[in-house]
Amino acid sequence: MLGKLNSLALLAASLSVVSAQYYQRLGTCPKLGCVLPPDQQDFLPGQYFDLRLEVHAPVNGSEAFNSGVPDEKFTVTIAKEGGEAKSVAEFFSLDEPEIEKWTFHWYEDLYAEDAKTPTFVNVASKIYRRIALYEPGNYQVKLTYYNGETTTADWVVRPLATAKKAKNVILFIGDGMTTNMITAARLLGHKSINGKYQSVLQLDDFPVVGHQMTHSVDSFITDSANSASALYSGHKSTVNAMGVYADSSPDLFDDPKVETIVELLKRVWGSAWGAVSTALLADATPIALTAHTRSRYAYGPLIDQALNSLTNYTWTNHGGPDVYFGGGADQFLPGSGSYQGEDYYKAFADADYDISLNKTSLTALSNSSKALGVFCKSNMPVWLDRNVFTNNLNSFTNDPSGVKGPAKDLPGLKDMTIKAIDILNERGGDKGFFLMSEAASIDKQMHALDYDRALGDLLELDDTVRATVNHLKAIGELESTLILVTSDHGHGFDVFGGVDTKYLAEQKTDREKRRAVGVYQNSGLSQYTVEKPGISYGTGPNFPVNWDPRYAIAAGLGANPDHRENYRVNNATSRNPASTLAGLSSNDYYVNPKDNPDGFVVNGTLPTSESQGVHSLTDVAVFAMGPCQETFGGVYSNIDVFYKMANCLGLARPDANEGGKGCAK
Amino acid sequence: MLGKLNSLALLAASLSVVSAQYYQRLGTCPKLGCVLPPDQQDFLPGQYFDLRLEVHAPVNGSEAFNSGVPDEKFTVTIAKEGGEAKSVAEFFSLDEPEIEKWTFHWYEDLYAEDAKTPTFVNVASKIYRRIALYEPGNYQVKLTYYNGETTTADWVVRPLATAKKAKNVILFIGDGMTTNMITAARLLGHKSINGKYQSVLQLDDFPVVGHQMTHSVDSFITDSANSASALYSGHKSTVNAMGVYADSSPDLFDDPKVETIVELLKRVWGSAWGAVSTALLADATPIALTAHTRSRYAYGPLIDQALNSLTNYTWTNHGGPDVYFGGGADQFLPGSGSYQGEDYYKAFADADYDISLNKTSLTALSNSSKALGVFCKSNMPVWLDRNVFTNNLNSFTNDPSGVKGPAKDLPGLKDMTIKAIDILNERGGDKGFFLMSEAASIDKQMHALDYDRALGDLLELDDTVRATVNHLKAIGELESTLILVTSDHGHGFDVFGGVDTKYLAEQKTDREKRRAVGVYQNSGLSQYTVEKPGISYGTGPNFPVNWDPRYAIAAGLGANPDHRENYRVNNATSRNPASTLAGLSSNDYYVNPKDNPDGFVVNGTLPTSESQGVHSLTDVAVFAMGPCQETFGGVYSNIDVFYKMANCLGLARPDANEGGKGCAK
């Protein structure tokens, strides 16, 4: 329905319409004038960011306005509390930017999508690039448009420290890891006698625990891009976005940016930094350290940003990672997966990186040179396949050199992390280092409902943290290093009993099979820690001695596609719980008949277009050890992890030390 | 199969058979000789306990032995590390107790149960009652039986403080409450703008967070009886048991006991103590403060134990609670629900208790007298029915006076808790007090998959904690009071998206209905905090302003009976997700056709004999504020909550101060 409203009374009514819940016109912008960063955002003193203003004129739909003509004469001011409001251009000593214009569309709800009736919105916009607020305090930005309508954004520049308390920070991220999963991993990997654990996780020995809230800036469920971005920049973002506030423009690389911890650390202290991940290196969690885009899936360009920093706008040069270890050869081999088809092994080598493509050469890397290690295509095979079901490795075609065949000489998270520490410690020297190390497949395997593979990678993370503590002690850096272990979001996983997998498999009907699940007292004791004659994986302490006991854990999530459960470990390949029916829509999933054929059917709770599980709401834990550990107790937002790290690293710059107050040139 | 084994070689083989997982012969006793308390248990110096020994002779089954004749000539010694082993009787200066004998049976697995082939076990046993270990250190108990077979139990008496650091302790228990639920409750009750909460939970302002592991002594999933017992006594127990280690004897009240925190506090300091619960007062969490039994369902006798302490054995007199507020009139009204049919209102009145049966008289209670408040039969109606859907209160027949009709003048958890503090503070005086306050229906409503009612009661708990902090400040007791908020176990609950409930209801098929669930960016923003014209519940800040928004949260558990979801609040009565089919087994549950008829079916993952959800494995959070708060960070076992509280209250008595070392008379 097209509408035309001119009176101010109707204007007010129209502008108070809140976007529908399911879809949003622009998540951070319930009114027709948008300020990005929006209301209620926090900043580190001296942190660079861009400021975008948008004025929306919906052409049709419930908010249709002004015949679809956006106000190009909008004005914007900024004032520090107690001070005078100045135009943004004056405040930051900038030239007034050009007006930009574009059109986008969205659906107001599912009915509109079913009816194929999008709402079109015309936009007038300006963006002020690379500005910074230095003095701590409260600021208000006011956008005025459509004859006196206003959108305000109240911001806080936090008073934070300028001196370093920690020389180094190591941030471990168990992607998708919740307290529920940590509890289950402990049950599998550690033996208890009459309720007392005989050994515990390394995480259990951390002195400080906190909880962080993971929601996005505009939705209560996050993805790994925008939650990583919150951890790294102190600014929440939108699903799929990182290092930017998502705007409505068609360009995925012009959104208003925020400076990240590695950019700040390089600019302020010249420290070394690195990333380690069991995912492809272009995946959200590692790439969000350097990425500024609304689309996490622009893998090729994002690897270029990781090496060369931003090239489309003037921005902080992070110098490239000193260490970069993970999967994702597709973005390095010249071809369709790499940026502009270029050879990024060569690009890194030209920038004086030593290149490693397997565990053997990883171990032999010099500690004094920058290092790139790419050990396979796509995500790295999981711990369970690398250590227990090793034959599965042959089923991959993931050799990182581009040869058709499997990657065979694979390092684990521990190998990569310890080597990364050695290089960063030597290269950082007195300036210290920042390392992010990610156990990515906790999340990826929870998506696949493959609980065993997820928990195996969680135990590998814990084993890596244990080795890290010991290694830091050995090289004399434990006291000077803040170690954090946290997550970016959850999955609604929990264990609810034990299950007699033999009994389950032998029953005829789904209802009879469910009888095999034992709850409460019938959950019994963990059989994963009971040795089975003839079974030895050689995986050492802190891992299960039997991955396929008759009495397994019964576990699940509240959010599923249709699937079938038998609760046994999948010893073949990674799990594929749901599949499409032959000849039907490729976006409509049913139980995969090849997955657990002797199990019982659990019909899904998710849209049938979802083939996997999805993220959940739960706060996630933060485990802290080292300098500033005491500041990580209690409950806080994910952005506070950034501010606490920044405070411990003395990254605040409350005086305009580069080019004076205002535009930092 | 009956067996007879005589050679020592076969003996050894037989005795190493581990009980099957699903069912266990006796959970703490994988061998044929049992020591209770078993191996790996911890003790407070001077804490009373009983020591039971059992020797098992299975008549049939996989462990059949000695023609089913148990060794009555077993011997038992105890030694402190570095000291000489003495007979238990000599060590504790006791007469040797009589041999007891009985027979019990169990099923080795589901096949045995299906075949109706129980295994019978003959038992010879002794029990040493009311003993204590005073000196901190390591002890070993050794049971010798069957010609040299041994079962050992290694115990630790922890070195803990004898001086008080906190005058008062208030322990809040959100029954079944997980971090996932806390996150969801925050989303419903608190408004956020662009990812920043404008107000937060009181729990979010606690300075210290820890995690505790909730598993039982003999199963990894706990119930509320044995987990409460662990929190109150420092000893894990078995599902349905509290204040005892479960033995195999037929008598539910002769199991080996452990002293609880209120018994210790009364004996050591003469402090006041009380319990508040929204459950029946005989329910597991409140009653475990004083109960010593293997069966939590012996409601009548347990209320007698709460008033009169134990009468069947010499034991600590806890003096009766100074305050006792909750539901459960059935155990107080004379009749089938009360102990020996007696009138327990009268019994409490005869023991100088003031009695209150409604909110009005609760408010008017003197602060100087002991007080019993019983406000309804069974569990108290939940916050949502008391505050939002108030008409539902008329559907109950729960008047606590025994009149047929609804209880109408009901206090909430906050009313009960604040009044309890006033009475305890006056009665405890300089000796201080201990209060346990339980939000019971978080658990009860999660069992019913009634997420809204569970989260409503969680918000009521948080509101109660907030009022408690403010009230303690007002009466000058905040600095002297340790406040803990924790849980006893979890349910595998999480929120995974938003849902368009209107769209869901209007679709025709289950698969189409699922399309209404929006995940990730489509979860959008909480609509529970968005005012709806014409809707006002008058429930003030920190609670939702709209409980039934079109865009609701989509949530669920991994463990379910068959049920149907529409994700809307149930505005009629508490949820009953599964029901039996007319004319079929009363123990075989299907989707309740009356529950959410416009929703989609989620078939269950639990045995079809389960009509509700069940508990889960996850560690639960501990929030701490006040003296000793710093000792509650990190990760630990539920029993450590007891030892940390006992340490803060100075309950250790490392010298045998009553009757000398050994038996405490």
Image: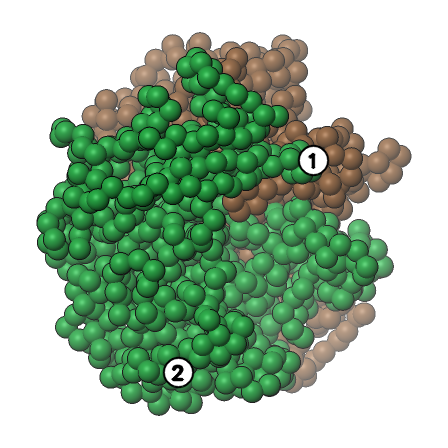
Chain colours: A green, B brown
- Reading the image, the residue beneath label 1 is A115
Q: Position of residue B31 (x, y in %)?
A: 59, 69
Q: Identify the residue at horizontal 60%, vertical 51% (top origin).
A: A557
The residue carrying pointer 2 sits among few (fewer than 14), some (14 to 19) or many (20 or more) residues within 10 Å by Cα, namely: some
Q: Amino acid at mark 2?
A: Lys
Q: Amino acid at mark 1?
A: Ala
Q: Identify the residue at horizontal 20%, vertical 45% (top origin).
A: A94
How far apart are the two marked residues, 2 and 1, measured between alpha carbons? 50 Å
Q: Nearer the viewer, residue B31 or A546?
A: A546
Dots 2, 1 in contact, CB < 8 A: no
* Subunit under mark 2: A
Do dots 2 and 1 share one subunit? yes
Q: Position of residue A436 (x, y in %)?
A: 34, 66
Q: Is residue A144 left or right of residue A582?
A: left
- Reading the image, the residue beneath label 2 is A346
Q: Quadrant of residue A201?
A: bottom left
Residue A223 drawn above or below residue A484? above
Q: Nearer the viewer, residue A255 or B629?
A: A255
In the rendered image, the quadrant that contains the N terminus of chain B is bottom right
First of labels 2, 1 by sequence position: 1
Res. B69 visible in picture: no
Q: Is residue A437 left or right of residue B507?
A: left
Q: Nearer the viewer, residue B220 or A637?
A: A637
Q: Quadrant of residue A321?
A: bottom left
Q: Identify the residue at horizontal 43%, vertical 65% (top origin).
A: A301
* Subunit under mark 1: A
